Image: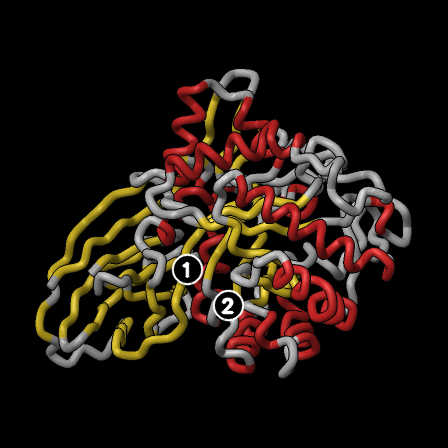
Amino acid sequence: MNIKLITTTYHDDQKNTYEDTKDFSTDQGVEMKVVNLYPEMEYQTFDGFGGAITEAAGYTFSLMSEEKQKRILEAYFGPTGNRYNLVRTHIDSSDFSLGQYAALEDPEDREFKTFTLERDEKYIIPFLTQAKQTAVQPLSVMLSPWSPPAFMKTNGQRTFGGSLKPEYREFWADYICHYIKQYRDKEFNIDMLTIQNEPNATQTWDSCLYTAEQEKEFLRDYLYPALVKNNLEDIEVSIWDHNKERMFERACTIIDAETDKMVAGVAFHWYTGEHFDAIRLVREKFPDKKLIFTEGCVEYSRFSEAGQLENAQMYAYDIIGNINAGMNAFIDWNILLNKEGGPNHVGNFCDAPIMCDTDNDIVQEKLSYTYIGHFSRYIEPGAKRIASTKYTDKMNVVALKNPNGSICVVMLNRSTEEVPVALRLAGQVTEFVVPAGAIVTGLI
């Protein structure tokens, strides 16, 4: 038995990724510097990795040459790239749109005669189409609304929060279903839906507030009946879609004997800290629900001074902690942006794993792209998390068993010292070093 090690280091703004192979030998009783893997102890199934194709991403993509577009597609969806199998996009506009818009603006049009995906067809759908054609496995798509049309809201605008007017709850549920059906008619595999992006945040961009009770009522009395009426019961609905620190309370309030069948999962973001124990609590309380990371990015407003290594480590640390706590899938935010971190119609600029200089047709793969790939290239959809133990807090470890029986272990060393490892598995052991500030993926 042997292990293939893929290591990425980063020094003086230079990335170095290299491979090595180590043989296992019989365990002679090693006790020090041990990392244990126990494939017989299985936990949740992992569905895959992905990112968001926003209007901003689609617009940026459209400005690149055909050669660079192909490179981007291969980098994310191709067999030698990060092998994404999940995509999230927005219902109507989000902050990462070129401006505000809705597919229907006429309050009197209850038959969707004026409904149009014209905006989506400019930039989102062409990018999504090419992603689907490039992907090495079927592409699952999640839809998430940032706001209902302005006329449906208490504040009469898409921005600054506001709530859904009670008299529009049924219409909004039908609107969401119509959106799904329009995408499915274009042969996209829309199989996931969140009820509202960040329902607890009043933003300067597209936003809408729901209390837990309001979200529960909307799902139970309007959205789920609309899905059934439209033969969309197969859509997996996730609640919350916001930061981790309140996901347990939200799940406890919404999920009961009546709504249990309506809720497929709980979606969460990372912007208020790691809160891995919050994920673990939801996993323990609701073991049959999918726990899906649906958004995270490096915000320039908060992390403008951080370098590429810190940003990449933020991704890897969160992915490892989330999976160990029970996460089923990871969907990054914008899969690419322009060199300014946009476009964004309210100036909420952010980093992305791939950035594009559209003026000079330059594609820049950030270190975060490589770090995500240390997971997504080797963890197959359908993998099972397995048990592991480690000897030091200088390193973070997660291990999964792929459907073909291979084992993938990812080790992150955020310290300034190398970490030696004696990896033990099934009576066998092999020894190697995780360099300072490095990430290592091992394949057995």
Disc 2 and disc 1 in contact, CB within 8 angstroms: yes
Q: Residue at x 55, y 48 (%)?
A: 88
Q: Residues within 10 Å of mark 2 (few under 14, many from 20)?
A: many
Left or right: where does residue 176 sit relative to residue 170?
A: left
Task: Name the residue nearer the viewer: 433 or 179.
Answer: 179
Residues 309 and 368: in front is: 368
Find residue 38 and report its image quarter: bottom left
Residue 376 percent location from the top left of the image: 37, 51
- Say if 38 sits above or below 219 in the image: below
Tell me which label, 2 or 1, sits earlier in the chain: 1
Question: Which labelled disc corresponds to residue 47?
Answer: 1
Residue placed furthest toward the left? 26
Local crowd size for mark 1, using a 10 Å CA cut-off: few (<14), some (14–19), many (≥20): some
Marks 2/1: CA–CA distance: 9 Å
Q: Quadrant of residue 392?
A: bottom left
Q: Residue at the spot x=76%, y=39% of the render?
A: 104
Q: Residue at x 42, y 58 (%)?
A: 415
Q: Is residue 24 left or right of residue 353?
A: left
